[in-house]
Amino acid sequence: MSADSSYTPAHLGQASGLPATPEEARLDYPPNPHPGALYLVRFVAPEFTSLCPVTGQPDFAHLVIDYVPGERIVESKALKLFLGSFRNHAAFHEACTVGIGKRLFDEMQPQWLRIGGYWYPRGGIPIDVFWQSGPPPAGLWLPDQGVQPYRGRG
């Protein structure tokens, strides 16, 4: 494993405010410390929030993001700020979940990525949204996302 001196983090080690919108959020992608290795990275955001685009009321979700790195990984502080930027963003569950997955996939260019958005009830109905970039790589250990079907999600 070698350090890449050309990588300069935008947020790591610095005070960084929450971006006003997801479009303004800058994600950082340092080099993969284990290029060529087949491994899974998981991020869990159990307190994700956004706004209903119709009522303006808050929506809550438990997000699970799994990916197999390519040449780069996503830096966790930048990802946290990106996800936090949805707090005042009005969009349907499908737009948030799939949009997060596609942005990470398009920018980071991992071998594979999936996102599960387990949304808490709106109008009495929980909505779960799933997206993946394609079939997982052969030989990958792919654990279950571990989120229970809605019964209080806890």
Image: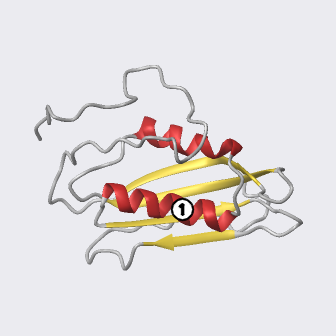
Q: Is residue 121 left or right of residue 83?
A: right
Foreground of the two, 147 or 49:
49
Specify few, some or many for label 1: CA neighbours under 10 Å numbering under 14, 14-19, or 20 or more.
some
Foreground of the two, 48 or 90:
90
Q: Can you give x and y, in whole percent of width and height, for residue 139 in the image? A: 26, 74
The image shows residue 68, relative to residue 4, as above or below, that is below
The image shows residue 21, relative to residue 93, as above or below, that is above
Q: How is the image coloured?
A: secondary structure
The quarter of the picture where residue 146 lies is bottom right
Quadrant, the N terminus: top left
Quadrant, the C terminus: bottom right
Q: Amino acid at mark 1?
A: Gly
Give the total of numbered labels.
1
Q: Is residue 23 left or right of residue 110?
A: right
Q: Can you give x and y, in whole percent of width and height, for residue 53 in the image? A: 77, 58
Residue lying at 37% horizontally and 62% vertically, measured from the top left: 106
Can residue 147 be seen from the camera position used here? no
Q: Can you give x and y, in whole percent of width and height, for residue 45 in the image? A: 57, 48
The image shows residue 11, relative to residue 131, as above or below, that is above
Mark 1: which secondary structure? helix
The quarter of the picture where residue 62 lies is bottom right
The image shows residue 5, relative to residue 70, as above or below, that is above
> Which residue in the protein does label 1 denote?
99
Q: Can you give x and y, in whole percent of width and height, for residue 137 in the image? A: 28, 74
Residue lying at 27% horizontally and 59% vertically, measured from the top left: 39
Q: Is residue 4 left or right of residue 30?
A: left
Foreground of the two, 144 or 42:
42
- Furthest-left residue in this view: 2
Can residue 18 be seen from the camera position used here? yes
Residue lying at 52% horizontally and 58% vertically, measured from the top left: 100
